[in-house]
Image: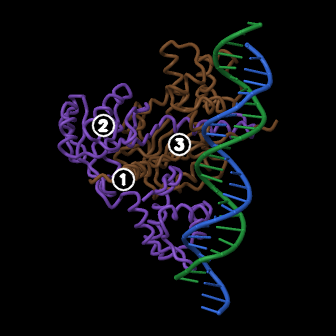
Chain colours: A brown, B purple, C blue, D green
Amino acid sequence: MESKEISQAVISRLPRYFRYLGELKDEGIERISSQELSDIMKVTASQIRQDFNNFGGFGQQGYGYKVEYLYEEIGKILGLDQTHNLIIVGAGNLGQALANYMNFERRGFLFKGMFDNNPALYGKKIRDMEVKPMEELQDFVKENNIDIAVLTIPKTSAVAVAEQLVKDGIKGIWNFAHVDLNVPKEIQVENVHLSDSLMKLTYNIIRYEEENNIKK
Amino acid sequence: MESKEISQAVISRLPRYFRYLGELKDEGIERISSQELSDIMKVTASQIRQDFNNFGGFGQQGYGYKVEYLYEEIGKILGLDQTHNLIIVGAGNLGQALANYMNFERRGFLFKGMFDNNPALYGKKIRDMEVKPMEELQDFVKENNIDIAVLTIPKTSAVAVAEQLVKDGIKGIWNFAHVDLNVPKEIQVENVHLSDSLMKLTYNIIRYEEENNIKK
DNA sequence: TAGATTGTTAATCGATTAACAATC
DNA sequence: TAGATTGTTAATCGATTAACAATC
């Protein structure tokens, strides 16, 4: 059975649909049409229907979509009904913040461990999880069936660590290191390049000012 | 003079060009052709030339591009030759981590202040910057010519705080709150929805496993 | 000058939007 | 049944890639 490839543009929109549908559900709203959702989310109704139909018909003609059903189906598409074993590699500022902030368990991510090469951090408890030395990383990943590694280490070591993680059987990397990882295509990488994002913001600020001849 | 609108797709690629050119520069490489850069960056040479030509001719026929010149021009396009006054609103895990981690000054961002509504944090020093109460936010933004606010507060208050910041004269918001802000179009917003990013990763992991019938 | 490589136009590809037949 | 709204095909739009003339 040939499954048509779904574009990343569509995938990128799914979490946003999921978020809005969750809110509608919490408000007790039971049904919604693509047009109503279009008004709320500021995307075209046509795009909404096209996006959903990539995954099969979730709606009903003449009626619309059942909010709760749609919410759950999108959750399943995003894999939120499954659990994923996750570790954080790099227990510096960002790694610690993500551990505390992300509420991984809420979406089925099981936070299994945290690693760093700074001895001062060994044993430090972050969210009930002791920081372990990098030397233990390899065995830990193999033995604990880790699916996802969050990479919050400096770019100088990120490429090598990523390659090691791949060898140890990781499936996906959530990469905060400011470097492009070089991993086989069967390993999924999601990059979060924060400084790139901030540069985009300044570009847009400046461009707007120039367009409108605003003196700084 | 009508300036053609440059697509966000192009803008999104600029920081990556900038990063690679910086590395080439550091390696002492003086010139590069679009084809060589294409090989390194894994994008088409055609796209590279098209992208650069949105901003004018940076190269020279028969020669290629001067690495240092190109690096600096892209830096200027991204506004890195200018300074931007920046504050962090929300001094929790993520806000503190960004303050410590981002090295704002390196790219012309002047970290001017940090705000929170948790009295336990008032006066706490993060990167030599004392956390101030939210009550002082409004006056501070007005008096200190703040351009950019980093929003690291919960989504429940993010929309209202963003609206207030707009009134106080902010130009751009780097939004980490998991909500869509509702601000006038002249205010630039760059969203970093971390949980959306993580969901994309799990989607891609699952999809790959399904395509290849891998048993979990 | 000949060779190399850009800048730019044209062709292709993919994603978004519009239209409407199917159907609840 | 009539009205509403999806699912899906067709049209449009925009972004990427290819081709090549300009020119260093």
What's the chain of the residue with tag 3? A
Q: Relative to A212, is A82 on the left or the right? A: right
Nearest the camera: D17 or B155? D17
Q: Amino acid at mark 2?
A: Val
Q: Quadrant of residue A124?
A: top left
Q: Which residue is mark 1?
A: A206
Q: Relative to C3, is A192 on the left or the right? A: left
Give the structural element (helix, strand or loop) at label 3: strand
Residue at image location 42% in from the left, 43% down from the top: B190
Give the structural element (helix, strand or loop) at label 2: helix
Quarter of the N terminus of chain A within the rendering: top right
Q: Amino acid at mark 3?
A: Ala
Q: Are marks 2 and 1 on the same chain?
A: no
Q: Quadrant of residue B41?
A: bottom right
Sequence-wise, the earlier of marks 3 and 1 is: 3
Q: Which residue is mark 3?
A: A149
Q: Is residue A185 above or below residue A60?
A: below
Q: Is residue A29 above or below residue B23?
A: above
Residue B104 location, x and y as percent? 32, 52
Q: What crowding class fits label 3: few (fewer than 14 Cα within 10 Å), some (14-19), or many (20 or more)? A: many
Give the spatial CA distance, label 3 vs label 1.
36 Å
Give the spatial CA distance, label 3 vs label 2.
38 Å
What's the chain of the residue with tag 1? A
Q: What crowding class fits label 2: few (fewer than 14 Cα within 10 Å), some (14-19), or many (20 or more)? A: some
Q: Amino acid at mark 1?
A: Ile
Q: Relative to B164, is B188 on the left or the right? A: right
Q: Is residue B34 above or below residue A100?
A: below
**Can residue B91 be seen by looking at this rendering?**
no
Q: Which residue is mark 2?
A: B166
The answer to whether the residue labelled 3 contacts the one labelled 2, judged by CB atoms less than 8 Å apart, is: no
Nearest the camera: A75 or A147? A75
